Amino acid sequence: MTKHELHKKDAIVSPLIEQGQSPYHIITNHPELDMSVRSLYFYLDQGLFTARNIDLKRKPGFKPRKCHKTQITNRAVFEKRLYSDFCKLHLSSFTEMDTVHSSRESSKTLLTFFFTEEKLFLAFLMNRCTKGAVRLIFDRLEKRMGTYEFLSVFEYILTDRGSEFGDPL
């Protein structure tokens, strides 16, 4: 974007922000700006407009989000278990496994399985999000299904790098 274009957009955006309008409202009512809301926030963050972040009504009240998900620290578990290795298998059927955390106050977590070929989604409630809790779910499933059926159903599992999946065996 040239300086001239930026100046024209600033002439529209900055006075409206100072009047208390939100970036979403500005972009919605001024299609001639030809930019997304995200771009407008980016330009404000970069200081390219006269208006600044502090001039936004709600921006000063928000705190940056914290990511609490821990990742696997033992890098040895990734040997022959990278996503690139998985892609080389050219599988038509596999299981995707992940966890869904409840509210911050609770330690309850869902262990979810998505069977790609069958389009089947299963979820199991865990009291904590740990390797041991995941292992407990697998032990219960194996006991109910029998070892042979269990191994054929869970032959290939795709997960993220969450610490709860740090024990692939």
Image (cartoon, rainbow, N blue to C red):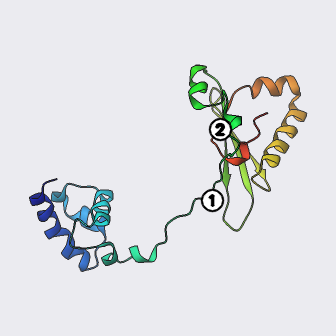
Which quarter of the image is occupied by the C terminus? Answer: top right
Q: Is residue 48 left or right of residue 133?
A: left
Q: Based on the displayed image, in which of its 4 quarters is residue 137 positioned?
A: top right
| Amino acid on which the number 2 mark rests in the picture | Thr
Relative to 11, say whether 112 is above or below.
above
Q: Are marks 2 and 1 in contact (CB under 8 Å)?
A: no
Badge 2 element: loop
Q: Nearer the viewer, residue 89 or 105?
A: 89
Please name the residue shown 32% across and 65% down the image: 45
Please name the residue shown 74% across and 61% down the image: 107
| Mark 2, residue position | 159
| Mark 1, residue position | 68
Q: Nearer the viewer, residue 166 or 59?
A: 166
Relative to 78, say whether 127 is above or below.
below
Q: Is residue 115 left or right of residue 43?
A: right
Q: Is residue 72 left or right of residue 13?
A: right
Q: Nearer the viewer, residue 144 or 91?
A: 91
Q: Nearer the viewer, residue 145 or 19?
A: 19
Please, which residue is most extreme toward the left here?
A: 4
The 10 Å Cα crowd at callout 1, few under 14, some 14 to 19, many 20 or more, is: few
| Amino acid on which the number 1 mark rests in the picture | His
Question: How far across and down, in percent of the image, does residue 41 sit?
Answer: 32, 63
Please name the residue shown 70% across and 35% down the image: 76
Question: How far across and down, in percent of the image, does residue 168 sit?
Answer: 75, 35
Question: How far across and down, in percent of the image, does residue 10 sit?
Answer: 17, 67
Sequence-wise, which precedes: disc 2 or disc 1? Answer: 1
Distance from the alpha carbon under mark 2 to that under mark 1: 18 Å
Please, which residue is most extreme toward the bottom here?
A: 19
